Image (spheres, helix red, strand yellow):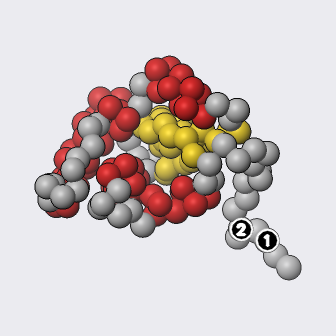
């Protein structure tokens, strides 16, 4: 069988992971979000079909969608963690990812179109600030 059109990643060693999502360019990786989970691939799936009632899923998922629609390559990096809350805090302090700084919303009061616009504007400002261009 030909497996050349399949992607692979190392199977996690522990149940807990910390992860970084960013834009991959030819020469660098530009992180925009840091998170932690015990759900591994399940957590990634939350971002592929984000639910508006889950503010973080919506924020991250729509940011990924915006970046991909604008021609950027988005990558997900992860590592095993013995203390995912602490590791997440350390990574956020070290990396200072822009999407972690964006406040959430109350889905009972917020409007999806407004939140989507805010997310896209937030990501566009970040792209402009770090001056990355399409490949």
As rendered, which of 91 and 74 lies closer to the eye?
Answer: 91
**Residue 26 visible within the image:** no
Q: Nearer the viewer, residue 27 or 86?
A: 86
Query: In the rendering, at what x and y percent does residue 37 appear?
Result: 57, 46
Q: Secondary structure at mark 1?
A: loop
Q: Where does residue 5 sit, x and y in percent of width and height? A: 70, 70
Asked whether disc 2 touches disc 1, contact meaning CB atoms under 8 Å apart, the reply is yes
In the image, what residue occupies the spot 61% across and 54% down? Answer: 39
Q: Nearer the viewer, residue 86 or 8?
A: 86
Please report the residue visible at 52 percent of the width from the left and 62 percent of the height from the top: 45
Label 2 Cα crowd, 10 Å radius (few <14 / some 14-19 / many 20+): few
| Identity of the residue drawn at 58% across and 60% down | 42
Q: Which disc number belongs to residue 6?
A: 2
- The correct choice, above or below, for 94 with respect to 68 in the image is above
**What residue sits right under mark 1 in the picture?**
3
Q: Is residue 81 left or right of residue 126?
A: right
Q: Position of residue 19 (x, y in %)?
A: 57, 40
Q: Dividing the image into 4 quarters, which one contains the N terminus?
A: bottom right
- Is residue 123 shown left or right of residue 38? left
Which element type, helix, strand or loop, lies under badge 2? loop
Res. 106 in view:
yes
Q: Is residue 14 left or right of residue 56?
A: right
- In this view, which residue lies farthest toward the bottom? 1
């Amino acid at each position: 069988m030909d497996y050349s059109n399949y992607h692979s990643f190392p199977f996690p060693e522990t149940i807990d992971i910390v992860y970084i999502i960013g834009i991959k360019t030819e020469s660098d990786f530009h992180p925009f979000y840091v998170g932690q989970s015990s759900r591994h691939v399940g957590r990634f799936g939350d971002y592929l079909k984000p639910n508006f009632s889950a503010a973080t899923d919506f924020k991250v998922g729509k940011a990924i969608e915006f970046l991909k629609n604008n021609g950027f390559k988005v990558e997900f990096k992860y590592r095993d963690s013995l203390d995912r809350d602490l590791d997440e805090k350390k990574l956020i302090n070290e990396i200072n990812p822009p999407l972690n700084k964006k406040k959430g919303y109350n889905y009972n009061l917020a409007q999806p179109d407004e939140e989507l616009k805010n997310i896209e504007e937030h990501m566009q400002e970040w792209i402009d600030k770090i001056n990355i261009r399409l490949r």
